[in-house]
Image (cartoon, rainbow, N blue to C red):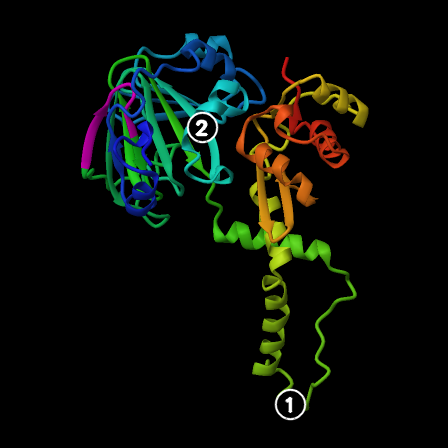
Amino acid sequence: MNTPLLGELSFDTFLREYWQKKPLLIRNALPGCQSLIAGDELAGLACEADVESRLIIRDASGERWELQHGPFSDETFLALPDTHWTLLVQAVDHWVPEAAKFLQQFNFIPSWRIDDLMISYASDGGGVGPHYDNYDVFLVQVEGRRQWEVGGLFDECSPRRADTPVTILSDWEPAHRWVLEPGDLLYVPPRVGHSGIAVGDGCMTYSVGFRAPSHREMLQDFSDYVGRQLSEDVRFADPDLVPQVNPGHMTAEALQTVHHILRRYVDDQEMLAEWFGRYMTVPKYQEAGMDVEVYGLEDVRGYVSAGRWLARNEGSRFAFQEDGRETRLFVDGRCYPCNEEQADLVRKLCADLTIDPKVFSHTGDNLQLLVDLLNHGSLYLPE
């Protein structure tokens, strides 16, 4: 199976030979592509308090760097120099429905792994310097031209400049250098160094980033989740304790008891699955969303009977698990155990950004699920 996004590569070939292994440049991956948002509209988003944005400004020599965090004002943009600045706006897909649709082209990767769509707009010479990310990224050139340098694996021990407000690798020797034109796509695996510099004004690049929580984050969150399920009465116990020569000795038997306690929870597959579903669907921004109207069961029954489509909140995350006859829907950190009759609706909710009421049965359980999703703001009724 081929897709224009990957040129002549199939999904299987890309995942087997490139995903988290080596960079890949695909020329004209999106022929005739045009930006979903104009530069001044992107600047307008960066002026909103709920939108995460940054401005990175450097001098022509690359010696002095300045970092500013939004929200910005019109005066901020009027005061920018003519060259060598970059505006970066995170999670544009949360605010622009067309940007959320753009991300669906990358659904050959599980959607619960996708983090967001960041858009950068740069003047001539603008860039953020040589750096690496701890996650995969697809870089799509949409307008203008950008030179990308790629090379080497880096980590937290790699030398970096101490005199800049942004992370810049100090020992930078690229292995590849390409100038990307509109429609070109560059894939960069985790920890591979890369640096992009705008060639001319009006350079707009889309960055599709992926969720890659650290093991530290996962262990901390899982232990917190388990702890919330346990009673204070469940405690360390050693009913088979025997006298010791030295009372300060932590014996192998005591450590084995601790091992059994901790392993009991990690080996609980049902608990682990529910935690992971909740964890990976927590929204990027907890407060992101819209004013939520309160719906009742009869309201929703009337809407779907009249053929009203439903839409997923662009900032919401949906995923599901199937285990035999049991289906669990995870939305924005919540878990919904579902019966067999709800399975079709669950799959539709997780596969599509908009839901046609004709494609699922209007049972009481299905409608009640929709009521809850609407009342939490995870779904909405588009105009």
Query: Mark 1 packing: few (<14 Cα in 10 Å), some, or many (20+)?
Result: few
Quarter holding residue 147: top left
Place of residue 375 in the rendered image (x, y in percent of width and height, measured from the top left) = 73, 28
- Establish if 250 lies above or below 113: below
Q: Position of residue 103 (x, y in %)?
A: 45, 28
Give whichever of 377, 57 is nearer the camera.
Answer: 377
Residue 57, image x and y in percent? 36, 21
Q: Nearer the viewer, residue 362 or 132?
A: 362
Where residue 52 sits: x, y (%)?
51, 25
Q: Residue at x 31, y 10 (%)?
A: 82
Give the mark nearer the N terminus: 1 vs 2: 2
Tally of numbered tags: 2
- Give the secondary structure at mark 2: helix
The residue lying at 56 percent from left, 34 percent from top is: 284
Q: Is residue 89 left or right of 223 when viewed as pictured?
A: left
Task: Point out the frontmost of discs 1 and 2.
Answer: 2
Q: Depth check: 347 or 139 in front?
A: 347
Is residue 128 visible in this depiction of the protein?
no
Q: Quadrant of residue 160?
A: top left
Name the kind of residue labelled 2 in the image: Leu
Q: Which mark is residue 103?
A: 2
Instruction: Determine if the magenta segment contains residue 139.
Output: no
What type is the residue that disc 1 sits on? Gln
Image disc number at residue 317: none
At 41% from the left and 37% from the top, the residue drawn is: 108
Quadrant housing residue 26: top left
180 within the magenta span: yes
Task: Tell me the magenta residue range.
Answer: 176-185
Rendered residue at 58%/22% (across/down): 50
Q: Quadrant of the C terminus?
A: top right
Quickly name the residue at label 1.
244
